[in-house]
Image (tube, rainbow, N blue to C red):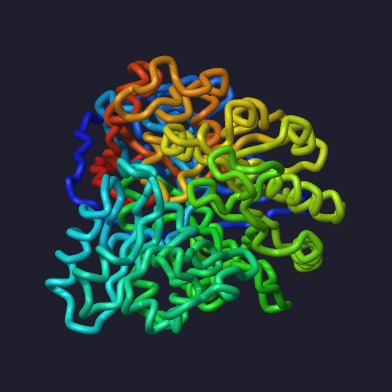
């Protein structure tokens, strides 16, 4: 019996972030529930058949079928409706729900391999400075927020980028201070590696008067004017001088940000996030509290680790959260010239960025990760930063079994490309970083070093698949914008024609692999997540177009109609008819 009951989609985003992870061990002694054999080991009583659609099971071939059969949060099969009905009968299903997809497309659930849940939730409640083209525009946005903020309260914002200004020099606090004297102001740069503050914030932090001799610190700098006074811009670790005087939110307030982020992210089609750089307090809440998408948690670890930071997973829930690794940072960002380079910045002779920790200290931290069974995920932007990270992995051979990760891997010296495969190091990269940075990257690096910049094709190999993400809130979390950037290497207007450094473009299938199976591999979940295959988790999205059947421009505009995690619809609405068998 066939039933064609419409597929109804809600226009409301009803979501909350969830997490599920497993320890990133390459070898597992026992079969996992996600294995195909385990999928045949139980006899579900109830199942759901999604039919009359175009269902992509995943890479490497990205072939489509008409239907998907799901039971108990896992995939039973992908294929034609008749064959899936026979499978349901053979598996002993006694109650079958049927959903008519109405010709719509189903993709495996998309993962963001590098994001910041709390940071994104925080951005949703602070002043959004993305796209501001001048100091005056930023000041006006801050002043608008000040008008509705009680006197004396901090005003925070994020997203400014001096490279968008007609004069791309770092701003100074004068124009901001003149309009915001009743509030301390802290504005993070788009990459999170610099901040611009006003005079009141500088005063609260004790950064007044002549600061010459005090401006440099390990991994950071307070920018000074000709008289030795703080300009208002702080680079990397120097931002902590002001952050420490900002009232810290309660754990409940921080958790509200995580939930706010999660509600937004499942609406983007994301079913899993690798949450990078979480402190112990919030990590404990993540493990204890289920959310609607899967969160793979990486503890912030530049200050060290203890036995309390061992990997662990919440129990008894389909979408469990788990602490799987440790987030480390070796350098800053290219836009704020904090990325550690092997030679001078082309637009700042004498400057080469900085290391946030010493090379010896990084080896100690990687060794501590290995001892605890935590997968190291190390932020590295510059070619020197990447080399130091690869050297640290080489110095701790045991870490290879944990699939060590290099986060961003933005600029890599040509002779270091091969070392990723040799060391089993996984490049975790963000396609939209390339299209955001391309207007000014050559000025920072010069033409020659661009050969190793955002080099998606030079880094991946069969032994080290790419994992793609967005680094939200640095970039927008929409994975379809990431797919578009990966396959075109152009901005939203299609510039430059043919793409920036076009030899590094990837195919749509390769890009989808990196947002699904590649991201799953990066947390040793390739037998559980990233594909719609028998025994895998029933994580998928229903979208308004087939990305393989439209132009690359149309891929960017893909709209998510429903998101399903572990068989549960967490965004949109699915209606079904129940048919007793």
Q: Nearer the viewer, residue 194 or 320?
A: 194
Q: Residue at x 62, y 52 (%)?
A: 353
Q: Residue at x 26, y 49 (%)?
A: 134
Looking at the picture, how far across and down is residue 227, in whole percent? Answer: 45, 69
Q: Quadrant of residue 289?
A: bottom left
Q: Residue at x 52, y 69 (%)?
A: 238
Extreme residue in the left direction: 147
Q: Is residue 41 visible?
A: no
User: Count the marks: how many?
Assistant: 0
Q: Quadrant of residue 428?
A: top right
Horizontally, residue 377 falls left or right of residue 105, namely: right
Extreme residue in the front direction: 227
Horizontally, residue 276 falls left or right of residue 176, namely: right
Looking at the picture, how far across and down is residue 421, in whole percent? Answer: 77, 35
Q: Quadrant of the C terminus?
A: top left
Looking at the picture, how far across and down is residue 86, in whole percent? Answer: 46, 28
Asked if 58 appears above or below 316 in the picture, the reply is above
Asked if 357 appears above or below 401 in the picture, the reply is below
Q: Is residue 183 visible?
A: yes
Q: Residue at x 82, y 37 (%)?
A: 422
Looking at the picture, how far across and down is residue 102, in whole percent? Answer: 25, 27
Q: Quadrant of the N terminus?
A: top left
Q: Nearer the viewer, residue 61 or 31?
A: 61
Q: Nearer the viewer, residue 183 or 48?
A: 183
């Amino acid at each position: 019996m066939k039933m064609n009951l419409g597929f109804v989609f809600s226009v409301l985003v009803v979501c909350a972030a969830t997490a599920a992870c497993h320890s990133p061990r390459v070898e597992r002694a026992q079969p996992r529930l996600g294995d195909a054999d385990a999928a045949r080991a139980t006899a579900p009583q109830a199942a759901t058949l999604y039919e009359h659609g175009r269902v992509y099971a995943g890479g490497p071939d990205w072939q489509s079928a008409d239907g998907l059969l799901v039971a108990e949060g896992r995939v039973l099969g992908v294929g034609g409706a008749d064959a899936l009905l026979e499978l349901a009968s053979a598996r002993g299903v006694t109650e079958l729900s049927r959903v008519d997809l109405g010709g719509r497309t189903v993709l495996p659930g998309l993962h963001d391999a590098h994001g910041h849940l709390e940071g994104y939730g925080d951005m949703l409640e602070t002043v959004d400075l993305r796209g501001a083209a001048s100091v005056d525009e930023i000041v006006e946005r801050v002043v608008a927020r000040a008008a509705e903020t009680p006197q004396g309260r901090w005003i925070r914002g994020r997203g400014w980028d001096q490279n968008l200004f007609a004069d791309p020099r770092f701003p100074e606090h004068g124009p901001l201070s003149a309009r915001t004297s009743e509030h301390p102001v802290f504005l993070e740069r788009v990459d999170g590696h610099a901040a611009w503050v006003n005079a009141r914030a500088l005063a609260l932090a004790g950064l007044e008067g002549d600061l010459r001799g005090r401006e440099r610190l390990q991994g950071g700098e307070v920018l000074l004017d000709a008289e030795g006074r703080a300009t208002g811009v702080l680079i990397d670790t120097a931002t902590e001088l002001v952050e420490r005087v900002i009232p810290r939110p309660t754990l409940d307030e921080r958790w509200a940000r995580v939930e706010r982020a999660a509600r937004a992210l499942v609406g983007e089609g994301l079913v899993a996030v690798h949450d990078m750089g979480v402190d112990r307090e919030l990590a404990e809440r993540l493990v204890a509290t289920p959310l609607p998408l899967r969160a793979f948690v990486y503890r912030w670890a530049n200050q060290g680790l203890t036995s309390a930071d061992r990997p662990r997973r919440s129990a008894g829930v389909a979408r469990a959260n788990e602490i799987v690794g440790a987030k480390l940072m070796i350098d800053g960002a290219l836009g704020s010239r904090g990325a550690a380079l092997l030679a001078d910045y082309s637009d700042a002779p004498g400057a080469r960025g900085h290391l946030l920790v010493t090379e010896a200290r990084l080896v100690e931290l990687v060794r501590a990760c290995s001892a605890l069974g935590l997968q190291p995920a190390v932020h590295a932007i510059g070619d020197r930063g990447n080399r130091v990270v690869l050297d640290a992995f080489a110095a701790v051979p045991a870490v290879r079994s944990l699939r060590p990760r290099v986060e961003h891997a933005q600029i890599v010296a040509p002779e270091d490309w091969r070392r990723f495969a040799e060391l089993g190091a996984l490049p975790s990269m963000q396609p939209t970083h390339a299209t955001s940075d391309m207007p000014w990257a050559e000025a920072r690096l010069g033409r020659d070093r661009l050969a190793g910049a955002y080099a998606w094709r030079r880094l991946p190999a069969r032994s080290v698949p790419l994992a793609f993400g967005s680094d939200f809130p640095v970039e927008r979390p929409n994975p379809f914008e990431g797919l578009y950037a990966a396959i075109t290497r152009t901005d939203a207007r299609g510039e430059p024609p043919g793409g920036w450094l076009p030899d590094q473009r990837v195919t749509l299938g390769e890009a989808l692999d990196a947002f699904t199976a590649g991201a799953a591999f990066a947390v040793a979940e390739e037998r559980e997540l990233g594909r719609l295959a028998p025994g895998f988790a029933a994580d998928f999205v229903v979208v308004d177009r087939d990305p393989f059947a439209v132009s690359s421009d149309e891929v960017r505009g893909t709209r998510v109609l429903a998101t399903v995690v572990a068989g549960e619809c967490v965004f949109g609405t699915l209606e079904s008819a129940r048919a007793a068998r």
